[in-house]
Amino acid sequence: MGGTAAESSCRRTTRRNAGRKNYDENMIDEIMESHLGSVPKKRNRTVADLQKETELEAMIALSLGFPIDALLDEEIRAGVVSELGGREQNDYIVVRNHILCMWRDNVGKYLHKNEIMESVSNEYEGMVRKAYEFLLSNGYINFGVSTSIKAEIPKEATMGSVIVIGSGLAGLAAARQLLSFGFKVVVLEGRKRPGGRVYTKKIGRRGRFGAADLGGSIITGIHANPLGVLARQLSLPLHKVRDKCPLYRPDGSPLDEETDSKIEFIFNRLLDKATQLRQTIGAESAAGISLGSALETFRQLYSVALNVDERQLLDWHLANLEFSNAGLLPQLSLAFWDQDDPYEMGGDHCFLAGGNGRLIDAMCDNVPIFYGKTVDTIKYDSHGVEVIAGGQAFQADMVICTVPLGVLKRRSITFSPELPKRKLDAIDRLGFGLLNKVAMIFPHVFWGEELDTFGCINDDSSRRGEFYLFYCCHMVSGAPVIIALVAGEAAITFESTDPTHSLHRVLSVLRGIYSPRGIEVPNPIQTICTRWGSDPLSCGSYSHVRVGSSGDDYDILAENVGDGRLFFAGEATSRQYPATMHGAFLSGLREASHVLMAARSRQTAVMKSIPRYSQLSEDILVDLFKKPDRTVGKFSFIFDPRTDDPNSMGLMRISFGENHDVCDTKNVGEGENVRIQCSSKLQLHLYAAISKGKADDLKLVSGSNENKLIYLHKNIGLKLMGSRGLGASGNCLVASIAGARKSSGRSSCSSVKT
């Protein structure tokens, strides 16, 4: 992913066999249309049609990470079926796959349950409800940035409050998802821009500008990729990274195809031998061996790539391997360096026209982000969290930390209490490497319109990753932009090298290639050199499995702590998709789901603590409203006393009638007793959840109580209900305010406050 983000999940080579046409993500619509029709109608299909449709939907679900004939572990934990195996599970899988395909057929439109029922028999309504709830709450459907999906975000937050630290892909994905779930969210970002390690910079001058991705740049594998979904929703074109990638020797001469193919074969055979070694000795023994040492041992053992030319070309492939992992080969674990390969997303690798910053900009829309807020302390306990950034305190129910692994390694953030040793050890074991870039914009394209990439071989093994690969971005940047990659040891040295010297070296490489062919390489209009390792908010580029580590450490990093108060997201928390932009994005959706589950669990616990009998529940309300926080005519309000946030939610009560006894007396005659007949007239109390700001607005409404009631209904859309109609969220709110009045602690329904 980025930070610069792993540009390629292809471990062996980035020069892949594929066609040259631009990739159009909307082609998936045409494919599904031809197989399914625009609106699949299971009720009116023949048995053969249903079978064909079911098989196709199963294959699409498989591409999205769902097993064909089994449930995900998450589905099992969610209890989507009463019994594993058998017909119920099979039917559920068919329904689940159908829902997935319905949404994927039109990712720009929010999919509602009633639309699903138009194509599913009524007998499966309960199954549709379970599958829909699981897919929705876990971020498999109805996520993204389309107008239809944004329109479904609740106007009022009823699920509690969450602080998200970091506005990279993980943080923004989590924030948008939480907003859709009904949470109050704020994002704290240390930089003055969003995106984190995904950074599209506008470069150039005098009317000649182009977009350069200084961080994560390639969408690695477009099939089922959530970033492809965002691109479709925004109608942004994708450009497939074309197959052609010529290599040039240190003297600038082109490498012949025979030598190229020979060394590429040797490189892949060395990797095969390394894989066979770990299979022979076992993962436990291989865990202490580096991939680099294994490859060099086999190179010497089989006496391959011995002459200078062949060794230099092999170094190019080794540099490409270090680039893919953002790690030095002597540090990569032989046992687990490629543990995520089984989950690699299929399809072409693509550039996004205009840069990935366009996705970031769309994801920021209507998300409250505070810039320049570098977090230094995170406090958490059973009552909630407090985050300190620049001397300012932010409080909420939960927090999601999405800072890069490099920041966690540096211990830049103080956690109180300290993180569990298990998590700290995982942070220390995992590797976090470096990739740097030189982005240049030129007056014109001199490298050829037909190229997306080309490579350069270095004559110094210690500098094999220096400018070893070039991205030709003219097809997507809007200008003649080219980006040189610096990987491996060269990326580390690059951090302390004078940018002027680096520019001189990269221009020497380019001129060594093109000048002998009579092509002039002009001076660039503008140049930018990245230093991701020196950036205190990234401290590197992306993660890898270092010697002594394993894929388990990604899972440990993803674990929440503090009884479901502190959560972690980011590419280094994704075991299946580490070091990728889509891995970061998916981790944000994952943690939003975990936050939702934690909030619901606490709401359930609160509800169990509230007496079941309505009279006792009414007594709680009566007691609270004995001392209302505000009163406007017949309207009384109670709020959480711990915050002055105008968006914090409270409860309003309106009273109808008078609360007293009415008695009739009658004198039946002199000397006789008076008979008294009494009847009780009780007040009617109706309630509604309302923010402090809306309550203040009510003061400005002139006229009678009736006028105020009409205002609440027409202008705010408030719905009045009896105490029994408050529901789980309402009762949670009542319990929160009651608890807050008794103590100064935070509760599960409190708001973000600064």
Image: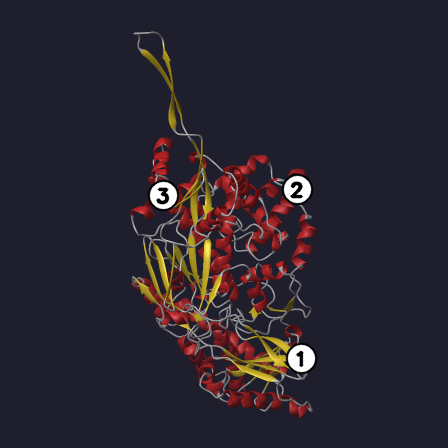
Name above or below for residue 517 compared with residue 541: below
Q: Indicate which disc residue 309 carries.
A: none
Mark 2 crowd level (few <14, some 14–19, many ≥20, 10 Å Cα): some
Residue 324 rendering spot, x and y as whole percentages: 50, 73
752 or 692: which is nearer to us? 692
Q: Which residue is mark 1?
A: 207
* Amino acid type of the residue that numbered disc 3 sits on in the rendered structure: Ala
- How far apart in space, not on screen, are marks 1 and 2 (Cα)? 53 Å
* Disc on the earlier residue, 1 or 3: 1
Q: Of tags 1 and 2, which is closer to the observer?
A: 1
**In what element is the residue under mark 1?**
loop
Residue 126 rendering spot, x and y as whole percentages: 52, 38
Decide if residue 342 is in sight here: no
Looking at the image, do the residues carrying marks 1 and 3 touch, with CB atoms under 8 Å apart? no
Q: Residue at x 36, y 73 (%)?
A: 410
Name above or below for residue 719 compared with residue 148: above
- How far apart in space, not on screen, are marks 1 and 3 (Cα)? 60 Å
Q: Which residue is mark 3?
A: 735
